[in-house]
Image (spheres, rainbow, N blue to C red):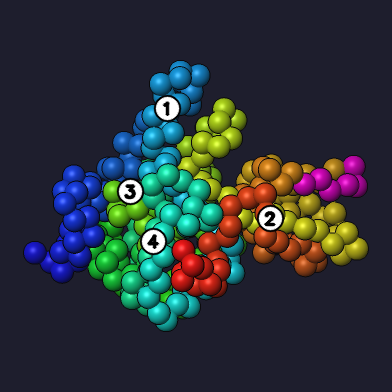
Amino acid sequence: MKESTRIMLKKHGWRIDRAAHNYIYFAFYYPYVKIVQLFLVPLKRLTWIKPLQYVGDMAFNRYHGKVMSLEDAEKIFALDEDISAVSSANKRIIPRKYAYKILFQEPACIAVMDCPCKLSYGAAPETINSCLAVGKGVAGFWLDHGAKYHARKITQAEALDLIKRLRKQGHITQAFFKVATGGSTGVICNCHPDTCVSLKASSITRHIRPDLSQSIESGYSVTCAAEQCKLCGICASSCHFGAVRVMDEARTYDAAACLGCGLCVDDCPNKALKLFVDDAKSRPLDMDDVRDHLTSA
């Protein structure tokens, strides 16, 4: 048995069912996500059925993505120490019932693998090798079992360069949490709404149950310095969620619709936009904040 498989089994303890789910999820990543993608087609037309809403609630409490800013991603890919934050106090950051652990063991061990969502939706070939695993447990498993998905080891700097390149193409940074993988993060994805199962599922459910969303907002909202804003409209075209509009020589912003991904801030040519921690939302996945609360969690 490979060391990465032993690490995975140890993580789940007596929950052999979750260990089996974990193994299937990563070893057969593409067909697993393809099935979920196919399920979304009828779900979009049947969201009015109450039992399906309960199924969605059950699923999203166990599997979800936390949107991240570029700055918070940079902190993860600069880690030089293990992070183990497993308390339910993390729900201030990951407001879900089950999967909320923040674990990065040997964080300099990083692997990149083909994204099953992008494969399923026929994304541009140059964007497909873009799912990142941080930490020996997850990254090691990908390297041992993900050859068919072109898994390979990369450095922290290479991972960050990949994130920056894809953000310039409109991809959002998300950290994923799943009960079947130990209820913890370790997977960082570069997601585009056109080719991401998580973002598509969130889009389907958000208008029915605002609290029922697979993608959790980053914890940030955006402020605009009016004196620097030239009303060029680039922020509006950068936003995938309709949170920004520029028309009739005026800019409007809907903080509730904003996931705080920071793409508009990255793209603003006049540096008029900034992210700020919005107390009306969950806390950001900021590793400095996580460290500060490790002892009090």
Residue at 47% from the left image edge and 37% from the top image edge? 201
* Cα–Cα span, label 3 and label 4: 13 Å
* Amino acid type assigned to the residue bearing label 3 in the image: Val
Q: Which residues are magenta?
A: 248-253
Q: Residue at x 67, y 54 (%)?
A: 279
Q: Which mark is residue 54?
A: 1
Is residue 74 visible in the rendered image? The answer is no
**Circle 4: element type:** loop
Q: Position of residue 226 (x, y in %)?
A: 88, 59
Residue for badge 2:
278
Label 2 secondary element:
loop
Kindly report the distance in space between the C-alpha atoms of the residues bearing marks 2 and 1: 29 Å
| Residue found at the far bottom of this picture | 80
Give me the C-alpha separation between circle 2 and circle 3: 27 Å
Q: Which residue is mark 3?
A: 179
Q: Can you tell which of label 4 and label 1 is closer to the viewer?
A: 4
Q: Is residue 35 left or right of residue 20?
A: right
Asked if marks 4 and 2 touch (Cβ < 8 Å), the reply is no
